[in-house]
Amino acid sequence: MKFANEGEWDRAVRMLAGIALLYAGWGGFTSGLFSIVLVIGGIVALATGIVGWCPAYTALGFSTGRTTVGHCPHCDSGHRA
């Protein structure tokens, strides 16, 4: 995906954290407003991990994904070998 700005390890950590937060929020460990905050945080973390795009990374110009390399250094500059 061209818009993805998360690396594989970042996505895995986000998905695991999202699942843990959802479990903590819905599992009865907490109650009230804190439970709602955990569920919302879990949904956001899980969704950004699945999609591979983080709006905060985009706003900050940050990425944990690999940078794509052009297919050859001469083609990008207009020179042919």
Image (cartoon, helix red, strand yellow):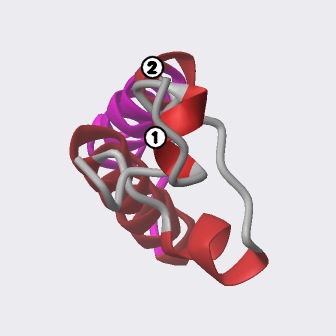
Q: Which residue range is magenta in the image?
A: 13-32
Spatial CA span between label 1 and label 2: 29 Å
The image shows residue 16 at horizontal and vertical percentages of 42, 22
**Three-letter amino acid code at disc 1?**
Cys
**Three-letter amino acid code at disc 2?**
Glu
- Whether residue 29 is in magenta: the answer is yes
Q: Residue at x 40, y 26 (%)?
A: 71
SS label for mark 2: helix
Q: Nearer the viewer, residue 80 or 58?
A: 80
Q: Are marks 1 and 2 in contact (CB under 8 Å)?
A: no
Left or right: where does residue 77 sit relative to residue 44? right
Residue that mark 1 sits on: 75
Q: Residue at x 37, y 51 (%)?
A: 4
SS label for mark 1: helix
Q: Does residue 57 appear in this view?
A: yes
Is residue 6 placed above or below 81 in the rendered structure?
below
